[in-house]
């Protein structure tokens, strides 16, 4: 009897912003070979070195933020055989990354240069995925697209039913980098959508979560169940500080002064500032939403 085809999964540390253990791509090999997320354009040479000599059938992108999709154009330039899979709303940004670049320059001028220069991707190399789409990679390996908005409206996670690994991108925040933080980055973190996405992910009963920041974690159920509370605590902390401080800058300064964050590098501190900035946008959006009338 023929040997059943198994898959192998490798974590590729892209050394995002020059720091190890902060951002990764995943290499999933079966009869076909896929990467999940690609890291930044600046870290693309490192990714390409790891993939040297391989045929890469797919690059599955969880979303088009430049620390996940910035390297995709470089990957396709080196691997013209690759099909890049992304949510339909992300697709135009990969064909023309200019808005992603200018958005990042506005959101974080200090971090923006560290992302490198993304390359546009020919539309023929791009494929939009819909919720529930199944991508067979081998007889015992497939990825299922699962829409998981919240971190971004176009965020998709990918589930491998045979192994139970769920590639969550940024949908469940940071893991071990070095602080487990909800990823409330601009322009629009949506708390309610994130909560619904967590319920969907729990329904899949994953055995492991593959975080983009950073690595595999096997306490999938506990990490998913605790995420909505961690988001609430984080947003409540930012909201509370805003009450007593003169401006949003002071809120970020106060959070950064917390001893929990003392080990963060300058890059890590800038990323945290971005999460504070996004949390403030989320709180403002929630406050400006029309209140539903209480039942009479
Ligand atoms: Zn992101």
Image (cartoon, rainbow, N blue to C red):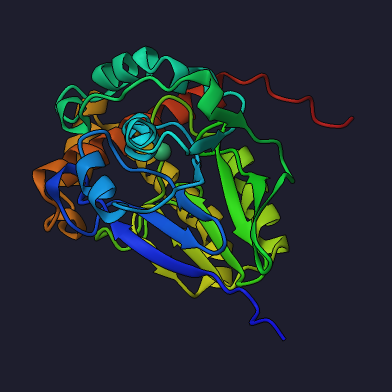
Question: In the current view of this chain or complex, which residue is farthest to the right?
Answer: 296
Residue 51 locus on image (x, y percent): 32, 52
User: Which residue is depicted at the point 23% across and 44% down?
Assistant: 255
Position above or below: 80 against 171 = above
| Residue 8 appears left or right of 180 | right
For the residue pair 229 and 5, the one nearer the viewer reads as: 5
Position above or below: 201 against 183 = below
Question: In the current view of this chain or complex, which residue is farthest to the front?
Answer: 1
Residue 200 locus on image (x, y percent): 70, 53
Looking at the rendering, the quadrant in which ligand 1 lies is top left
Position above or below: 223 against 196 = below
Q: Is residue 252 visible?
A: yes
For the residue pair 212 and 14, the one nearer the viewer reads as: 14
Residue 197 locus on image (x, y percent): 64, 47
For the residue pair 173 and 38, the one nearer the viewer reads as: 38
Residue 36 locus on image (x, y percent): 46, 49
Q: Which picture quadrant has residue 106?
A: top left
Quadrant the C terminus occupies? top right
Q: Which picture quadrant has residue 64?
A: top left
> How many marks overall?
0
| Residue 60 appears left or right of 48 | right
Position above or below: 22 against 80 = below
Quadrant the N terminus occupies? bottom right
User: Which residue is depicted at the point 18% across and 53% down?
Assistant: 258
User: Which residue is depicted at the point 32% across and 29% down?
Assistant: 277
User: Which residue is depicted at the point 42% across and 58% down?
Assistant: 27
């Amino acid at each position: 009897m023929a040997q059943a085809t198994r898959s192998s999964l490798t974590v590729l540390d892209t050394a995002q912003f020059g720091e190890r253990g902060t951002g990764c791509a995943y290499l999933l090999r079966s009869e076909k070979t896929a990467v999940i997320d690609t890291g930044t354009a600046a870290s693309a040479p490192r990714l390409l070195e790891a993939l040297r000599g391989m045929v890469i059938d797919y690059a599955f992108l969880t979303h088009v933020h430049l620390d996940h999709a910035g390297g995709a154009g470089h990957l396709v330039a080196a691997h013209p055989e690759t099909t890049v899979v992304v949510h339909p709303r992300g697709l135009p940004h990969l064909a023309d990354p200019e808005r992603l670049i200018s958005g990042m320059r506005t959101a974080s001028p200090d971090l923006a240069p560290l992302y490198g220069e993304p390359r546009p991707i020919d539309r023929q190399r791009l494929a939009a995925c819909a919720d529930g789409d199944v991508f067979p990679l081998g007889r015992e390996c497939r990825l299922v697209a699962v829409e998981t908005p919240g971190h971004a409206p176009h965020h998709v996670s990918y589930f491998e039913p045979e192994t139970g690994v769920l590639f969550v991108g940024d949908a469940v925040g940071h893991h071990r980098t070095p602080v487990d933080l909800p990823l409330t980055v601009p322009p629009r973190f949506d708390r309610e959508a994130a909560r619904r996405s967590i319920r969907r992910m729990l329904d899949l009963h994953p055995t492991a979560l593959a975080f983009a920041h950073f690595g595999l974690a096997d306490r999938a159920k506990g990490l998913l169940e605790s995420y909505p509370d961690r988001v609430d605590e984080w947003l409540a902390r930012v909201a509370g500080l805003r009450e007593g401080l003169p401006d949003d800058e002071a809120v970020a300064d106060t959070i950064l002064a917390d001893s929990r964050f003392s080990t963060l590098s300058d890059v890590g501190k800038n990323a945290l500032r971005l999460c504070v900035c996004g949390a403030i946008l989320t709180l403002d959006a929630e406050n400006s939403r029309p209140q539903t009338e209480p039942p009479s």
